[in-house]
Image (tube, helix red, strand yellow):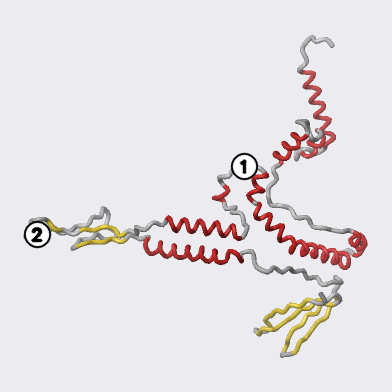
Amino acid sequence: MDAFIYKYKISIDGKSTECAKIWTAEQIITAKKINGVWEKIVDKNLFGLIPVVYAEVDFPDWEDSAKVLDSFEMRLSRLSDTNDYFSEPILKKYGEADLPGKSTVGKEISFPVKMDEDTGKEIHGDADYLVWQQSIDSIKEELSQLRNELYSGTSTPDLSFDNLKGIGNQSGVARKFMMMDAIIKASDNMEIFEPVVQRCISVVKTGISNISNIKYKGDLEDNNIEAKFGTILPEDLTEELDNLSTANGGKPINSQKTITARSPYTKDVEEEIKQMEKEDSQSKVSTNMVGATV
């Protein structure tokens, strides 16, 4: 790459002004277009290389799930509209009725009673609530399936609280299997993003050796710094120690000194070991049988 340029606009005295910045290995050129004429400022590029790092992918991560996402959002929108329309009760009445007021306590509906002169039967009105009788189970199932397709299509594990609260304390292997799809996707993306991170390291090394700490230039140039990518999965130390102990035949895998040094309550390792030995000796003496002969 011989040069890198990007254009942007700023506001000067309320007017939009076109600007540009150009990097080469030797210079950094900042330009503004004032009254149709480009005015530029040239500075030396102390990095000695173009300090720009970028990556390009063919499609965004959600490309395969774009249609599913649209369907999911549309279904939620329609469901919300339907709930807004049908959630309030609607009373149907037949014939004349005396309806109670909105603030009336102990409400009742009065219907006038009349007699049918031909049959001699009583005739009166009636009322009931207009209820949406259609089942929404199919909508729930559709939303559930669309949600699963969204996570599956983007290789993303569902780490929501409702989904995780019932799984308990899973082993390290089980957690890795839960994240397997995302781990495979991350490994595939390393072909793009690993060189980007390595390029960032190169830029930082050059900046340190040429600008901030010139005396370390030789050391930095001789060192090959590489990035290592970790994992967000929590480590199960108990499981790892159990496996190591099993592999070692049930014997201790660390010395007492090493374990003591790792304790957050240990201030002086040597002094702590001496105190533990002293307490151990005192414990042995106090547990000897009275009158025992050696």
Whether residue 177 is situated above or below residue 152 in the rendered picture: above
Disc 1: CA contacts within 10 A as few (<14), some (14-19) or many (>=20): few
Q: Secondary structure at mark 2?
A: loop
Q: Quadrant of residue 8?
A: bottom right
| Image-based side of 133 in relation to 209, left or right | left
Q: How many marks?
A: 2
How far across and down, in percent of the image, does residue 76 sit? 48, 62
Please tell me which residue is depicted at 79% across the width and 22% down the height of the picture: 282
Q: Quadrant of the C terminus?
A: top right
Real-space Cα separation, disc 2 to disc 1, in angstroms: 74 Å
Q: Earlier in the sequence, mark 2 or mark 1?
A: 2
Please tell me which residue is depicted at 84% across the width and 71% down the height of the picture: 49
How far across and down, in percent of the image, does residue 19 sit? 73, 81
Q: Mark 2 sits on what residue? A: 116
How far across and down, in percent of the image, does residue 185 sit? 68, 58
Q: Mark 1 sits on what residue? A: 169
Q: Quadrant of the N terminus?
A: bottom right
| Amino acid type at mark 2 | Asp
Whether residue 294 is situated above or below residue 233 in the rendered picture: above
How far across and down, in percent of the image, does residue 134 sit? 36, 58
Q: Nearer the viewer, residue 66 or 220?
A: 66
Q: Quadrant of residue 133?
A: bottom left
| Image-based side of 121 in relation to 212, left or right | left
Q: Quadrant of residue 50?
A: bottom right
Cβ atoms under marks 2 and 1 closer than 8 Å? no
Whether residue 272 is situated above or below residue 51 in the rendered picture: above
| Amino acid type at mark 1 | Asn
Disc 2: CA contacts within 10 A as few (<14), some (14-19) or many (>=20): few
Q: Secondary structure at mark 1?
A: loop
Q: Nearer the viewer, residue 114 or 30?
A: 114
